């Protein structure tokens, strides 16, 4: 393991590369990353880093976002099969057909989506800015793709009509309201922090609902000492590192995303050695998707 870490460091220097890792990545990958964050933070970092090569330790749509925002850089995805079942619930053709059914609706696209779907959308959003994005639009109706739980969460705070796409994250949907009740009974002092991709009944039982970045911030700033966490288990590594003395418990043992766990140190070393697999979003999809992401960054 030590040898592998040394090799990765050397390859990074040779290639002029940085490693950007999502909060859900395995602990060892988070530990060697140059930057760890949520998908929005990773996209911003991809666009601003002076590095020529980016190893995106995450899933495909994140590597695509990096390619959309930084087309001149080489984006490596250590495991080419690291996809996202939520992103896979929508494609460009399906979205075009839905647009025909709701011609007066704006299309808001959660970043957990394929590049070709972003290209067909009016504006993108993340789990932390979804409501602000929806409110920034002049439209009365919004077709929200692809996560129905995030769509439902947003609809609680707006008068606009939100038409949800029927996609969801299998990992976040594993948390049941019964598990929340059991966990609360076992840890009565703990605050419940969940991601809006969880089911509505789980979200309603939470003390705080937010993106992984929001959950990390809440835990840092809170005076509470115990927390029940309703998002992918990888985040516990950072929560514990940033909050010595505070206790974190997962709401469900099912909170593990198999795709996020496909990245390993061996695969990172291999992709830097071989400079593949490369993720590159082709034109004109890239510039159209860039437009939707840029409109989000301007709107919020
Ligand atoms: Fe996709 Fe869910 Fe895994 Fe995130 S946790 S990458 S939304 S399947």
Image (cartoon, rainbow, N blue to C red):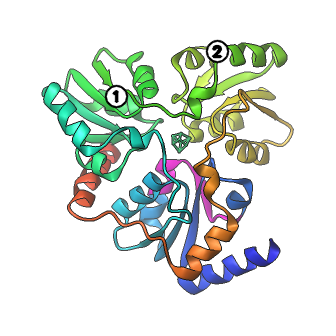
| Magenta run includes residue 121 | no
Q: Earlier in the sequence, mark 2 or mark 1?
A: 1
Q: Are marks 2 and 1 in contact (CB under 8 Å)?
A: no
Residue appearing at x 33%, y 52% in the figure:
115
Q: Relative to 265, is 222 above or below?
A: above
Residue 166 appears in which quarter of the rendering? top left
The C terminus: image quadrant:
top left
Residue 299 drawn at (x, y percent): 30, 40
Which type of secondary structure does the marked residue at label 1 adopt? loop
Q: Position of residue 109 (x, y in %)?
A: 33, 38
Q: CA distance from mark 2 to mark 1?
A: 23 Å
- Packing grade of label 2 (10 A; few <14, some 14-19, many >=20) is some
**In the picture provided, is 288 more to the left or to the right than 5?**
left
Residue pointed to by mark 1: 165
* Residue identified by numbered label 2: 177
Q: Which mark is residue 284?
A: none
Any part of residue 190 in sight? yes
């Amino acid at each position: 393991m030590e040898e592998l870490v040394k090799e990765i460091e050397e390859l990074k220097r040779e290639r002029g590369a940085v490693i950007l890792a999502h909060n859900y990545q395995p602990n060892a990958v988070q530990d060697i990353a140059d930057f760890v964050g949520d998908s929005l933070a990773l996209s911003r970092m991809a666009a601003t880093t002076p590095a020529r090569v980016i190893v995106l330790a995450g899933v495909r749509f994140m590597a695509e976002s990096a390619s959309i925002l930084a087309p001149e850089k080489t984006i490596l995805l250590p495991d080419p099969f690291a996809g996202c079942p939520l992103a896979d619930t929508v494609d460009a053709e399906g979205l075009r057909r839905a647009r025909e059914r709701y011609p007066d609706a704006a299309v808001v696209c959660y970043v957990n989506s394929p590049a070709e779907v972003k290209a067909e959308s009016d504006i993108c959003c993340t789990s932390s800015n979804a409501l602000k994005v929806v409110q920034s639009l002049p439209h009365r109706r919004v077709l929200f793709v692809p996560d129905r739980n995030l769509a439902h969460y947003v609809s609680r705070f707006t008068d606009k009509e939100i038409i949800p796409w029927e996609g969801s994250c299998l990992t976040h949907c594993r948390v049941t309201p019964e598990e929340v009740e059991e966990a609360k009974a076992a840890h009565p002092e703990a605050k419940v922090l969940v991601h809006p991709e969880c089911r509505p009944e789980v979200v309603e039982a939470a003390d705080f609902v937010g993106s992984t970045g929001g959950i990390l911030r809440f835990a840092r700033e809170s005076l509470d000492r115990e927390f029940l966490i309703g998002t992918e288990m990888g985040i516990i590594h950072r929560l514990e590192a940033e909050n010595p003395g505070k206790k974190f418990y997962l709401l469900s043992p099912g909170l593990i995303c198999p795709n996020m766990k496909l990245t390993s140190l061996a695969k990172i070393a291999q992709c830097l050695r071989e400079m593949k697999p490369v993720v590159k979003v082709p034109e004109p999809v890239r510039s159209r998707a860039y437009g939707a992401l840029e409109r989000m960054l301007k709107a919020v």
